[in-house]
Amino acid sequence: MKNKYFAIINIGASAFRMIINEYIEGKEKTLEYLVKPLSLGRDTFTKGYIALENVYKAADILKNFKLKMDEYKIDRNYKALCTSGVREAQNRYFFIDYVKINAGIDLIILEPSDEIYIKYVGIRDELKEFVHYEKKGLIFANVSSGNVAVSIHKDNIMIYSAALPYGSLRLNEIFKYIPIINKYKAYEQYVSNMFYTIKTALPQGFKFQYVVVSGSSINLLIDLLNPEKNLFKKKDLLNLYKYIKTMDINDIIKNYNIRHSDAEVLLPTLTTYINLLSFTEKDEIHFSRTSFPLMLSNYYSGAIKDKELNKRLRKSFYYFGDRFKFDKNHARVVSKYALKIFDNLKPILSLGSKERFLLEVSAILHEIGYFINARNHEEHSFHIIKAVNFPGFSREDVTTVALVALLHRENPNKNYEEILVTLNIEKRLVVNKLVSILRIADALDANHNKLIRDINIVLVHDKLRVIVKTLKHPFLEEHSFKRKSKLFLETFGIRPELEVKIDYE
Amino acid sequence: MTMSNEYLFINREISNVAFNQRVLYEAIDGSVPLLEKLKFLSIFSSNMDEFYMIRVAGLFDQLDAGYTEVDRSGMMPLEVLEKIDKISKKLFNEQAKIFKNLIKECRKENIIFFPKLEGELYDIAESIFLDAILPLISPITLSAANPFPFIYNNRLTIFIELKRDDKFFYSLIIIPDNLKRIFQIKIKGKHLILSVEDIIVKFLDRIYTGFAVVNSYIFRLTRDADLTVEEEGAEDLLKLIEHELSKRKKGKVVRFEFNKDMPINIRDFLKKNIGFNNAHIHVIDGKLDLTFLIDIKVDNDKLYYKPFKPLLPNTIPLTNEIFQRIRAKDIILYRPYNDFSLITNLVEFAALDPDVLSIKMTLYRANRDSKIIKNLIKAAENGKQVSVVIELKARFDEEKNVEWAKKLEEAGCLVSYGFVNMKIHTKNLLILRKESDGIIRYSHIATGNYNEITARLYTDIDYLTADEDVGYEGAQLFNYLMGYTEFLPKKERIILAPKDLKNKIISFIDNEIAETIKGKKGYIIVKINSLIDKVLIPKLYEASQKGVKIEMIVRGICGLVPQIKDLSENITVRSIVGRFLEHPRILYFYNGGNERFFISTADWMERNMDHRVESLFEVIDEDSKKFLWKILDYNLKDNCKSWQLIGKEYIKNTPNGEKPFNCQEYLINNIESPLF
């Protein structure tokens, strides 16, 4: 990699941050780091929209950030990402448009799953022991102003992941009318509800071994507790908590010499940390000092790569399937056949490795809806998949997989055109291609009994020869193949043909 | 007085006057050349003018507001004013006497002050009057149609009594700003110095034709000139400052000066018509307002300090290679012994260098025709991003700075005026340069202004480094000053007031106290211009009581009382007043043997620590630390130009049998060695 400059602007719920990095031979050097407090979250979490006055202020801040980019002659090498403060605002598109026109910066909304994924990748890159923690049983929480993003890992599987609306600024805003003397009780009750939500998703008797935290709250606690190494001790957090829990904001500012905005979120932050430790029955929290903008920069500039992502996701999707008692063998067989077809169609598919993985995930989860009912199971699959929230697997990816699963079964009584019209033509074509392949692969194990032992694919001119090896003639699969291969013909203009080969020597 | 109740403090204003007294006494120092002595009289006058315009005006404000609280020195505003009045009167009398003696000395050197305008000189004076003066003055003879005019701050004014047809008239001539105060004429090897007021008085009959001139008197008013800018909600600071400047000239009268021959009835008439009650009244024996003495130039080198050429170490190239040199090793310089033009040139190189991306600079007091500013404009025209943080509120330079701000903005520079309630006093230059191995930031950190004129008169430290941590924090500092971000230092190489600076200094002093408590050595040397902070002084007393040795080199105001048993016996305070104005702030802490050195822009006053953006920069380069140590050492060794504060009195140090050591003269002659 040659030297390059990359800028990240992160519009958080309580502050605007910007980092400009120089990447020399892949190594990062931070040239600039800017922080400008502006609490968009205060508007969003209480009123539901960003007040016009703050839209103007935001544009002014971003105009200055733009000047910094101009200084380094950064024109396109940047990403300006908004989290919950903008994401949850009803007028987010107006905000984005106003900033574009007035500051010349293109804003992107960062989805919660992307947000936590980037934090996960960032911290994984920084904390050497993180991989070990993932194996042993880890809760990773990103406590920020708007949300608490949580992911739980064990044996390198992501067991749970969610962005929960319990961020410190949000809590502060929700309970701002509660008197100081009782405020801590309100926070405790509210936060305990978050842990209840998490608990319901965990297997019985799940034990945590490690707690890792990141987020804007870290620096505040570092300043106040001055911890040795990257570790907060429960007793230190409790001591601080006991001391400040009924303290007036002005006294907190005076006693600790911190900003007003930090003083406001100190109590909700501590409440979350302490409850996190109680929930996990641990005494210490590991943390990362790497700022979110730096993580974003390293991620978007390609300085850190998550080579294990698909492997990890695959495991997690199987685990997810298990939770819904899916037919794992069927999932395995269908994904194997689907990928074989995909790989053999490469010259005509114009799809890449990303779509290949989406096909695989669709094959794994396509029948997960059986958990609810076999009848219209494809619809149930669609809804269950839509609830997937795995870091590294974007909302867009989730939607694609859910649609492919929905359409894997031809249902003459249903018309999904309404859903499909929301996609642009390119996306729609991708979905069609993947569904065409999945339908064939699914047909090849129609009986769910692995009658077909293996397949070979030969693409000749206008024909796709699917040669199946089997010990018994697969009547149901043959019938199913005929029915389910129509879309393939419509999509590619290639006629799929099934050739049965009895596998004997 | 014990530590448990009140600390001992010297009143700030009294200490300020005491500093001006030391300046005045340079005019009787035998080692000072004759014309330089005149300059010290001038500096004394302008310092006292400023003192009256700002400090005394402030005390009158307190008095008017009915403020009767006792300050840390145990004095109420009225008491302070009375004491100032008493000391000032004494000092102005001394100044007048010194000037009379110096006039005699000058006569021996063929410099003739205020000769009688007779014979040939009458004709010359007449020509000057008709050509240069008359077109610029506007006499106002008082009448029902011509009421008493407004008399602006610091304008010399002539009051004339006239008579016509047995009727008396009063007239006023306010000498305008754009009229020269003195006219120097060289005749037959003699320098004749004529004052504008003498010439006007001589030719009053030409102005008042038809009148008989009965008498004339000179007077001057000093007005409150403190610029109070209420910036809250100010849309455009630039416009606001311009507006306030126009108001400055019209502040309340705080001092009324006149010659002793002005009769009481005229004084009362003026007092009544100008409209003031409790201004200080100064009856001057001789010429009023001696600030003009700094403008006297004669072609006789022996009457001036020996000229010297500021030196640039030969290891420093005055070419574009300077960037490589800075990368190789930090550069520390001591103005005016070292040549400030290096910094001027550096800005020029940066302006022309295609690899430079941006230049950032703070401007507090720049000189007219500043090469630095011209080069900043050139850089902007060359497509570099130039950011300039201008302090519009720099006292008495506001007009100049407004002018620069407009020029820089027109050239396309990003100009920022800093903060609403804080002056920006830190002096920084940052150059970003794209080099083969990435972006390199060149930082210049100084204790003095980017002013090519005062760089020859003030002593200051210039520090140049390409250290990445310093560059990063320098960029942070500018982002903060431009309003882009909060200040977030990584390694705390740059510490800022008002956020952290005072607390850091306290922690450094505490560290020395802790060392002393452990039975180890505690040692602090502080070189600053003023010490009046109500937190830092008691902290120094505390350190002294715990056994920390403290050597303070405080040029001007000092509120600390040293050498008091059980309070400050381990503290010494000295002040150096000499050819150059001592200006750098250098701090030294022994730190258990791991000595720490800092340079700073901050004086130890609440004003600087709590209401200004000031910086404290740690020097870690070993050679630079040695360099700073030498400066402190020479300051402490000086026995020619230094004054020792004993209790509340300053006593001038003398060699007292030891070898005389004049720190400033020594540095002029030895800057090359041993410092380099």
Image (tube, grey):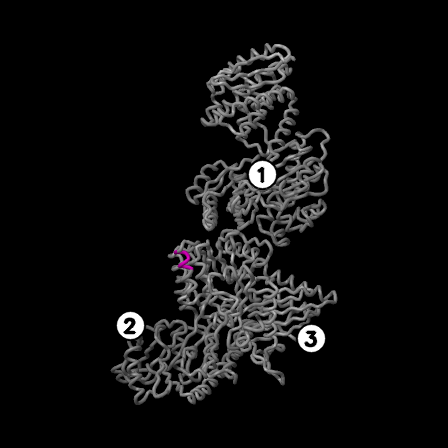
Q: What element carries label 3?
A: loop
Q: Which of label 2 and label 3 is nearer to you?
A: 3
What kind of residue is marked 3?
A: Lys
Residues shaded magenta: B376-381
The reply, left or right, for residue B211 in relation to residue B577 is left
Tell me, yes or no, if residue B331 can be seen here. yes
What kind of residue is marked 1?
A: Lys
Q: Where A316 falls versus B444 (above or below)? A: above
Q: Looking at the picture, how far across and down is residue B470, in whole percent?
A: 56, 57
Q: Where B537 falls versus A47 (above or below)? A: below
Please report, as a chain letter, where disc 1 is located. Answer: A
Q: Is residue B674 magenta?
A: no
Q: Looking at the picture, how far across and down is residue A370, in whole percent?
A: 61, 19
Q: Which of label 2 and label 1 is nearer to you?
A: 1
Residue position marked by numbered label 1 in the rendering = A305
Q: Earlier in the sequence, mark 2 or mark 3?
A: 2
Question: In what quadrant of the picture does the C terminus of chain B appear?
Answer: bottom right
Residue position marked by numbered label 2 in the rendering = B145
The reply, left or right, for residue A97 in relation to residue B509 is left
Q: Of A437 and A392, which appears nearest the observer?
A: A437
Q: Of A324 and A91, which appears nearest the observer?
A: A324
Label 2, label 3: how far apart the Cα atoms are: 68 Å
Please report, as a chain letter, where disc 3 is located. Answer: B
